Image (cartoon, rainbow, N blue to C red):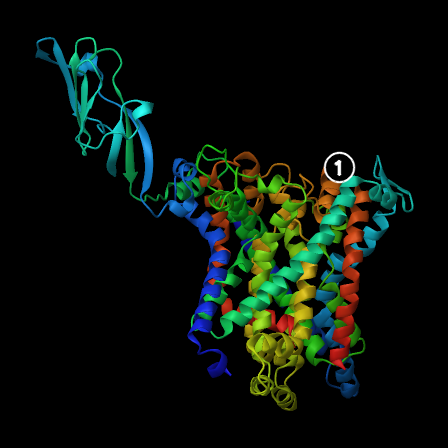
Amino acid sequence: MNPALQGLITIIIGVGGCVGYFYGANLFLDKVLFKAEGPNAGRNINRANMIRPWVFLMPALLALGLYLAYPVFATLRLSFLERLPGNEYAFVGFENYSKMFAEPKFIEAMRNNVLWLVVVPAAATAFGLLAAQLTDRLKWGNIAKSIVFMPMAISFVGAAVIFKLVYEARPEDVAQIGILNHLYLTFGGDAPVQWLQVPFWNNFFLMAVLIWIQTGFAMVILSAALRGIPEETIEAAVIDGANPFQIFFKIKVPQIMSTIVVVWTTITIATLKVFDIVFAMTNGQWETQVLANYMYDKLFRANDWGMGSASAMIIMLMVTPILVWNVYNARKEMQ
Amino acid sequence: MDAIAGRKPAVVWALNISVVALVVLWLFPTLGLLVSSFRTGDQITASGWWSSFLPAEQTIQLRVADPDEARVDLGNGRFMVEGNIFDGRDFEGELRSWGTTTRNLGAFQPGDVNDMGDGETLTLQADGAYVWEGNDEQISGRAQRVFLDVTTPPDFTLDNYSFVLFDEDNSEGMAKAFMNTLTVVIPATIIPILIAAFAAYALAWMDFPGRALLIAIIVGLLVVPLQLALIPLLSLHNAIGLGKGYLGTWLAHTGFGLPLAIYLLRNYMVGLPRDIIENAKVDGATDFQIFTKIILPLSFPALASFAIFQFLWTWNDLLVALVFLIDATGETTVMTKQIVELLGTRGGDWEILATSAFVSIAVPLAVFFAMQKYLVRGLLAGSVK
């Protein structure tokens, strides 16, 4: 069957099924299970209203449980097992973890991930804050914002191609078509450089791609936060003779600190999971491995589910502090 | 405030210049790829894309007509070949200078007579007309080479797009991958919205024990990396006979998109005015009616925001497609995967790479510019309160 047709049918079945489920279950509750008539009408209405939320929640809870909650525990379990031939598993305790920590490629992935975690959120937030502040009072600021925001819509893979062209290096005697090498040679470099093959520094050239994508996100949110700052605080600072830098760093930034933290943590999570950029641009060669790509290698190239799951658990472990902090804040807000 | 800090001309200038620099920095990488997708492979390797808007200067090597066929006897043992150097080729541009050996490249202007010694001469006009004159021995054998320094006007082509999208013989074309991506994206965007809307309503406006705990769990699930889900779910799909395919991918995208969907929609629905809902209840409306007739229409902006997120995320996704969709036959490949393949096999063919990448980027960009308002709203609702 043509996949497009199959897709169309799925949409109809899926959407129809959802609507049918919600409508039917609701009707069943009111008209069959707990009829709102007869001697028990009042009690029945109350009972129906107690069950109704769970009717509404059921599909979502099923999907969340199956696709997000269950895998956390299943992966944890797999990380303590070794897959034997014939679909058998043997419990090996922490052996997958100890083997992994002994692997230089894993240590390299950890080191790079920490580098990513330090550089990308900081740089993207800083650029975003700068862009938000600079464009705020400009007539054409909205156009500028749109352009900085635009990479959000571009896939990591698309961005990888875009930046491969930027970093492209060609032999010395022909024209350079990568703009970075062109500028490098124009401003006194001696020979074109294969930017993605310079160990250690190539990590930063990969990070530039994610920073380029995430800055727009930071800018949009910080720009809204900057606009929310009460005018009086700034006026008071101006009257006291503060210069623009003092106003920015001592009056504005402290007032939007909570938003900066939210932006920072959101980008941190995106950075932790970075996979496509490395997969498409270097595939972990030249010492650019990161955890997510290491995990993919283990799972689908080496077919080692134990070590793959162990490295996935490392990613989960690194996300956990943010998870706890987010839940804590959400609960605080609801009270 | 604006009046004090914003009116000094120097400050305004500095501000404008720094924003221009920022915009250029953010726009140029994409622009480079876009421009490259409209150039031929030869043009891309001959000069950087930034010089494609200027007339290109290049040196081309051509030969005059074959003397054994075209020479004319002038008498006195002298012979001549006459013609146009651009005969038989499509040349639009300007001849700047020329030469006949690698040592005298560009030594002659159009109209100059090049004395090649022993009475052999070559004259070349700006329009390409030449006269090559000499004795019997000179005007025979191989035709004289001419090196031309020419300026060609900027030239762009749509051929790459027709090759990548519509060429039936191109096994690496994007047409099939485009359809596959679309097939993944549409159900994967619509289904989670429906499921999430009901759940969000229950979490926002219905009272039941455990509600606060559920909300906390959803906030927690927001950041769970989907990397954890790959192996357990793939095993599950294989165990229940789903295998790799569209259905599994739609389900996976639905599951992964739900936390954000519920979170965004709940935050929005909680902010709707309580009066409307209570009045409706007093008038005897059921929860189901309130949801479909009041909440759903009022929540349109939030629904649109999430729809854009989910659309962008599923369209741009690589990992989920690699794990849950693309099998060994490659029949169900999506655009992101196709581009990664091309990066491996056609790494140097920038015209193919750039065009393929732009085919995949164009749709999200169009959606982005058309619906930017909702995207911004969604972002703000999702992270700032």
| Residue B112 vertical placement versus B35 (above, below) | above
Give the quadrant of residue B156: top left
Res B323 visible: yes
Q: Is label 1 in a helix, a strand or a loop?
A: loop
Residue B155 percent coordinates (x, y): 32, 43
Q: Quadrant of residue B108?
A: top left
In which quadrant is the C terminus of chain A drawn?
bottom right
Q: Position of residue B175 (x, y in %)?
A: 47, 44
Residue at screen point 44% across, 49% down:
B34
As drawn, B58 above or below B73? below
Residue A25: image x %, image y %?
A: 69, 71
Residue corresponding to mark 1: A302
Q: Position of residue A46 (x, y in %)?
A: 77, 84
Q: Is residue B346 left or right of residue B38?
A: right
Q: Nearer the viewer, residue B284 or A331?
A: A331
Query: Chain under label 1?
Result: A
